[in-house]
Image (cartoon, grey):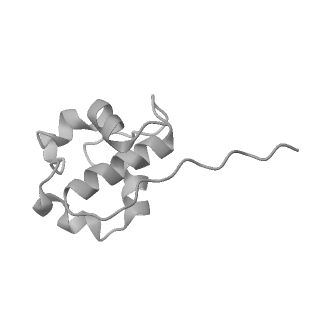
Amino acid sequence: LQAGEAVYKVQCAACHDAGLVGAPKFGVASDWSGRLGQGFDSLVNSVLKGKGSMGAQGGGAFDDIEIARATAYLANSGGGKFEEPAAPAPAEAK
């Protein structure tokens, strides 16, 4: 699995670095202040399913956990304190 920063650079930076169509900008706390209070799960849900001008990011080139990692990375740039999700434990063999 890729780290949040790597996924952000490929999947998210084009809009969030420039703040296109109202996207909260990377590193701009005032863009994130109202969103961070929603909680990490809510943010990830919005990213995976899409919200406003942002289309759904789930189901593409990255696993949902990688998108969640990018969400943590981006939100943390604006003042969030979310931990990057860990890789799931391998399934036990039966």
In this rendered view, identify the residue nearer to me: 3 or 61.
3
In this rendered view, identify the residue nearer to me: 5 or 23.
5
Left/right placement of residue 93 relative to residue 71 reads right
Q: Residue drawn 20% across and 32% down?
A: 14
Left/right placement of residue 13 relative to residue 49 reads left
Query: Is there any visible trace of residue 49 in the rendered image?
Result: no
Left/right placement of residue 89 relative to residue 6 reads right
In this rendered view, identify the residue nearer to me: 50 or 78.
78
Residue 54 location (% of width, % of height): 28, 42
Placement of 29 over or under 65, stated as above or below:
below
Placement of 8 over or under 25, stated as above or below:
above
Residue 75's quadrant in the figure?
bottom left
Placement of 41 over or under 65, stated as above or below:
below
* Total tally of numbered discs in the picture: 0
Query: Is there any visible trace of residue 87 in the rendered image?
Result: yes
Q: Residue drawn 44% across and 61% down?
A: 41
Residue at the right extreme? 94
Left/right placement of residue 46 relative to residue 16 reads right
- State the quadrant of the C terminus: top right
Q: Residue drawn 22% across and 36% down?
A: 13
Residue 34 location (% of width, % of height): 21, 67
Residue 11 location (% of width, % of height): 32, 33
Residue 43 location (% of width, % of height): 36, 58
